Amino acid sequence: MGTRADFYVGRGDKAEWLGSVACDGYPDGFDRDGLLNANSEEQFREAVAAELASRSDATIPQMGWPWPWEDSHTTDYAYAFDAGKVYGSCSDHWFDAHAVSTGAGDDETAADDTPVQFPDMTAIQNVDFGSRSGVIVIGT
């Protein structure tokens, strides 16, 4: 299975979902400048859009929520531009995504106390079990 990631502007249940990837969603899996080190919402949006456009495992909002779960709590990673920087989450807290991706901290030392909440995506759910799912099927 792939390491899935969801991208947002803002944090909380009113955040705007920008899209998702099914593979290599861990913090050091993104080389694109501006994705995890964005200084502005515009820079983050542009970097996320370019990342999604360059990948066959990407889902954009027009395609619907690709996962069989209701929100990003079950996704491996979520990234959000908020309050002037990019945050990441892979559990019950937010961390400084740029610090983690560059090795300047880990997700525990760079933790943020903002509650981890995500929008409920069931209304736009369109589960994908193909290339955008991150599931690897091996047959004999």
Image: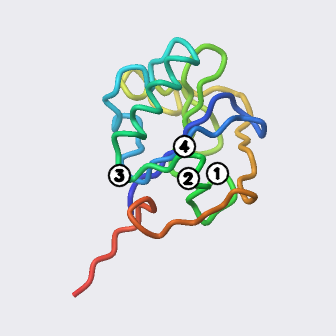
Type of colouring:
rainbow
Residue 73: give its label: 1
Q: How far is disc 1 from disc 2 in space, using C-alphas? A: 6 Å
Q: Which of marks 2 and 4 is in front?
A: 4
Q: Which amino acid lies under the numbered mark 3 shown in the image of this protein? A: Ser
Q: Which amino acid lies under the numbered mark 1 shown in the image of this protein? A: His
Q: How far is disc 1 from disc 3 in space, using C-alphas? A: 23 Å
Quickly name the residue at label 2. 75
Q: How crowded is mark 4: few (under 14 residues within 10 Å), some or many (20 or more)?
A: many
Q: In this view of the protein, can residue 99 be seen by the observer?
A: no
Q: Nearer the viewer, mark 1 or mark 3?
A: 3
- Check the image and name the residue furthest to the front: 62
Q: How many labels does the image show?
A: 4
Q: Which of marks 4 and 1 is in front?
A: 4
Q: How far is disc 4 from disc 1 in space, using C-alphas? A: 15 Å
Tell me which residue sits at (72%, 29%) in the image: 114
Q: Are marks 2 and 4 in contact (CB under 8 Å)?
A: no
Q: How far is disc 3 from disc 2 in space, using C-alphas? A: 18 Å
Tell me which residue sits at (46%, 51%) in the image: 4
Q: Nearer the viewer, mark 3 or mark 2?
A: 3
Q: Are marks 4 and 3 in contact (CB under 8 Å)?
A: no
Q: Are marks 1 and 3 in contact (CB under 8 Å)?
A: no
